[in-house]
Image: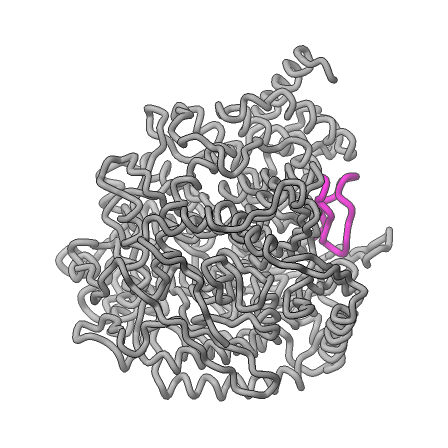
Amino acid sequence: MQLNSNVPSGPLEGKWDRYKFDLKRVNPANKRKFEIIVVGTGLAGGSAAATLADLGYKVKNFCIQDSPRRAHSIAAQGGINAAKNYPGDGDSVYNLFYDTIKGGDYRAREANVYRLAQNANNIIDQCVATGVPFAREYGGLLANRSFGGSQVQRTFYARGQTGQQLLLGVYGQLSRQIGLGGVQMYPRKDILDIVVVDGCARGVVCRDLVTGEIESHSAHAVVLATGGYDNVYFLSTSGMHSNVSACWAAYKKGAAFANPCYTQIHPTCITVHGDYQSKLTLMSESLRNDGRIWVPINKGDKRSPDQIPENERDYYLERKYPSFGNLVPRDVASRNAKIACDEGRGVGNTGLAVYLDFTEAIKRDGEAVIRAKYGNLFQMYHKIQDEDPYKVPMKIYPAIHYVMGGTWVDYNLMTSREGLFCLGGANFSDHGANRLGASALMQGLSDGYFVLPYTIGGYLATQSLSPVNTSHQAFKDAEKQLSEKLNKLMNIKGKRTVDDIHKELGLIMWDYCGMARNDAGLKTAIQKIQALRADFWENVDVTGSSKDFNQTLEKGYRLADYLEFGELLARDALTRQESCGGHFREESQTEENEAKRDDENFCHVAGWEYAGEGKDPIRNTEPLVFESVKLTQRSYK
Amino acid sequence: MEEKFLNLTLKVWRQKRGEKKGKIETYQAKHISTDASFLEMLDIVNDNLTIAGIEPIAFDHDCREGICGMCGQVVNGYAHGEEKGTTLCQLHMRRFKDGDTIFIEPFRAKAFKVVKDLVIDRSAFDKIIQAGGYITAKAGGAPDANIFPVTYETGELAMNAAECIGCGACVAACPNASAMLFVGAKISHLALLPQGRPEAAKRALAMVRVMDSCGFGNCSNERECEASCPKNIQITNIARMNREFLSAGVCSTSM
């Protein structure tokens, strides 16, 4: 398989504008002849569906939840970046580009990241125009705050629920198009296969989550915007329905899967407290604007935090990284929390926590100011932990929060399967090996509002696609295959529940493919996943009927895919024998325990190709070419 | 608070898909940590039901951090349970006592049909938004974001209204199954902002018309909606909706 990025030539700053000009267009009258399937209604999928319909295409939009307003983009808290330079602190498109590519540890495509930084300003304009109530200064203009990995204030926010407000803006645009008839909305559907005819993606097969019926839908192109695979770890900050299934089906239909080992462990999450726990909750990175992270200097210090004097505290991020302090990027902050806890200096009952302390900020600014900035986050923390963070420092620990890996796409956001596109968190994206805070929302909206609507026109205008409908044999075959798989799952009638097996998978992933990875551990992980997968297909118990609303079955087939995908993740981590961003190979670190890249051998994207049932997948590479930035050892000191 | 373990009796509404009648079934929830969330308690019960060969209780949920609006059940007569300003997924078992009996039912309203057990169909909310709960803005034509100054106070009021998560608790709590808090919140959010003014009149008329046609009731100032709202949306938003609707009606030629 050839992974051709299709990045246009010429100077970085002008690539996207020239490329848009060169793209073939579909004239307005012809657009209505094209049907496009968009899977997902988050920031990427929702904005793409709304914009494509606005342009005149006939759009079919699918989501798992009962309403498009509930996609998991809604849970993003802290903010969205743009280089507006409203605070006048010297920001620029180039600066945002540079921070993002450096933050990703030089494992993203230059041209994509530059385009993202360019689009960021349009995104803020578009969001405000659609009614997003971003925070304001008293003069009425927009306010900004800081996020990790940057020394300027460029993050726009709506209290601690920026994702919710951005998604409701997108949902408004999407709803308008549903009302006008431009988008046909299909809620409560799970996309479980991609249908390929004459080499091109021409439709999907899905399961109706209410009736259990298997349905086919055809189109001229298919767009996946289905989010990340975080839940392969069972415990993550993702929504309970987040899954890899549509992307995994795409993988098996020729869409390479890129860099699955690039997972993001977010430093500030509420700690794990019991084996019944179903998910983890993030405390936004924005809290690091005012909160100070520390542990006791001495091992095993069990005093309550207010009893530990200043000179017996170690504000380790401020100590080790004086120029970025508590606002180092996520991978650096997470790793240092782990180091502190591994040294026996962790706090709380389990010793797997560090303090995030607002005492000084409250003293400086007053409780009212802190409440206005972070009120909903403090409330959320209080409810879950039953401790008042205005009085007692938060106890936090890193957790799986995001994945940078995903379906491989070229500059057009097209996968290695013709006619199949992938957007937002689901693609392998612009974040390299580590995503900076407030960049995921930016990428989702950039892809959906400002990239795909142009590039998909370029694809459709240059194809001569034969008419295909769901009576085509390819749809019938896919439906039959899916029915058989579901029947097989229903008929195992073993003794283990789906969640029980999922939790075991999650522990394998966390223990061997978590914050630190090594050769022996990854090999062990692969063996354990294979054994667990075999156990699943012999011992799982799925109750009820496949032709009914059946949440156990939904969880079951999603887990079946995770049990295959988890192995690919471990395999990718094993073969990438360097550390970069969130992928920390213990064998490759600097003397100061920072991630040490190997640019000579690994300055590339790994795009995994499906080789068939029971065969080892093929590792293809796309070299990363840097024409504008110089690769350096990342330093936040 | 120290972690403790509870034994509870659940009285749960079970209703098969497509059947008009359901009934209350009794289950035991044993050894539930006070640190578990209400939905985690149901997860444990469901795992035990599965092992016992009984189909698990169907309920909607997703983010489990109080923002997606997907979860919602009536717990002991209260939408999302008795704790103020809390979604069901953020309600923790430390609010209950050992030996408690807990009644769990779906949100009930003429406009919300039961899909199965505790799962309901809230698509009427989507229909109301589709009628006009947005600002028309094509991707490409937006002016610079700072062209619309918004006073700090107005921004805060708009944000207060915009926090609605569309869960439907307000409808479930209202004796008339009115959706006016939900609709009032969206109309207020957009009408308060300068960029929302051009369509304000059209929006108010269209959304109220669809709200009525979906079978939601009227407001009789019981304030149950406000009391049950997990995001503390205030009924002043209903007053603002009424003002927007009336002034739109007076000025309109197409009512």
- Rendering quarter of residue A494: bottom right
The relative height of residue A208 versus residue A559 in the rendered view (above or below) is above
Quick one: B47 or A36, which is closer to the camera?
A36
- Rendering quarter of residue A366: top left
Q: Which residue is drawn at 23% across and 67% down?
A: A301
The residue stretch that appears in magenta: B104-124
Residue at the farthest right position: B20
Residue A441: image location, x then y, percent: 44, 49
Quick one: A583 or A446, which is closer to the camera?
A446
In this rendering, position of residue A198 left or right of residue A500: right
Q: Which residue is drawn at 34% across and 75% down?
A: A516
Query: Would you say residue B123 sits in the magenta stretch?
Result: yes
- Rendering quarter of residue A144: top left
In this rendering, position of residue A502 left or right of residue A78: right
Quick one: A419 or B13, which is closer to the camera?
A419
Quick one: A613 or A624, which is closer to the camera?
A624
Q: Can residue A411 be seen at all in this image of the molecule?
A: yes
Residue A489: image location, x then y, percent: 71, 78
The relative height of residue A381 versus residue A341 in the rendered view (above or below) is above
Q: Which residue is drawn at 49% across and 88% down?
A: A527
Residue at the farthest left position: A311
Residue at the farthest top position: B250
User: How is the protein colored in the picture?
Assistant: one colour
Residue B150: image location, x then y, percent: 41, 25
Q: Residue at x 48, y 23 (%)?
A: B194
Query: Would you say residue A394 sits in the magenta stretch?
Result: no
The relative height of residue A455 versus residue A471 in the rendered view (above or below) is above
Q: In which quarter of the image is the C terminus of chain A?
A: bottom left
How many tags in the picture? Answer: 0
Q: Can residue B84 be seen at all in this image of the molecule?
A: no
Residue B118: image location, x then y, percent: 72, 54
